[in-house]
Amino acid sequence: MNRLWDVMDEIVQLNDCDIYTYNPDVDDDPMNEEEGYLWSMNYFFFNRKLKRMIFFSIKSESMNAPTAEDDMDDMDDNDDDINLIGHSSRRYQDEFSMDDMD
């Protein structure tokens, strides 16, 4: 877990960040529509000086919830247009320009 915080600190310098949370009502939470959803925590770490932001989201789902493998079993094998690699976990790495922010 320390490695996670080290990487985040390298990206946005956590001590210089403003931290915001997103706490939707249960009925308005977009993740609540997913089968097996239990709870989620959502944070934004924003370093205004570096003009960088990290969106950090954690969710919990029931062990009885369908998995990505279950979804693959339900899909037609001939459908090549859908890429299921990283379906349950996606990693994005990119440089963002936030020049318009003060």
Image (tube, grey):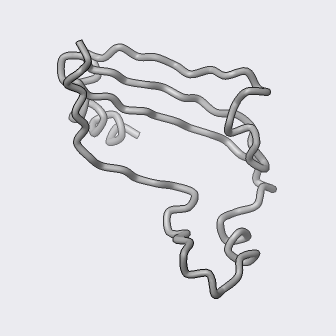
Quadrant of the snapshot with the N terminus:
top left
Using the image as rendered, state which of residue 67 and residue 94 is in the foreground: 94
Q: Residue at x 43, y 33 (%)?
A: 55
Q: Quadrant of residue 73?
A: bottom right
Using the image as rendered, state which of residue 98 and residue 44 is in the foreground: 98
In x, y percent, where is residue 80?
55, 81
Using the image as rendered, state which of residue 6 and residue 56 is in the foreground: 56
60 lies above or below 51: below
Q: Residue at x 71, y 68 (%)?
A: 71
26 vs 96, left or right, is right
23 lies above or below 1: above
Q: Residue at x 68, y 36 (%)?
A: 30
Q: Quadrant of residue 7?
A: top left
Using the image as rendered, state which of residue 63 and residue 85 is in the foreground: 85
Q: Residue at x 35, y 14 (%)?
A: 18
52 vs 78, left or right, is left
In x, y percent, where is residue 90?
46, 54
In x, y percent, where is residue 98?
24, 27
In x, y percent, where is residue 56?
46, 34
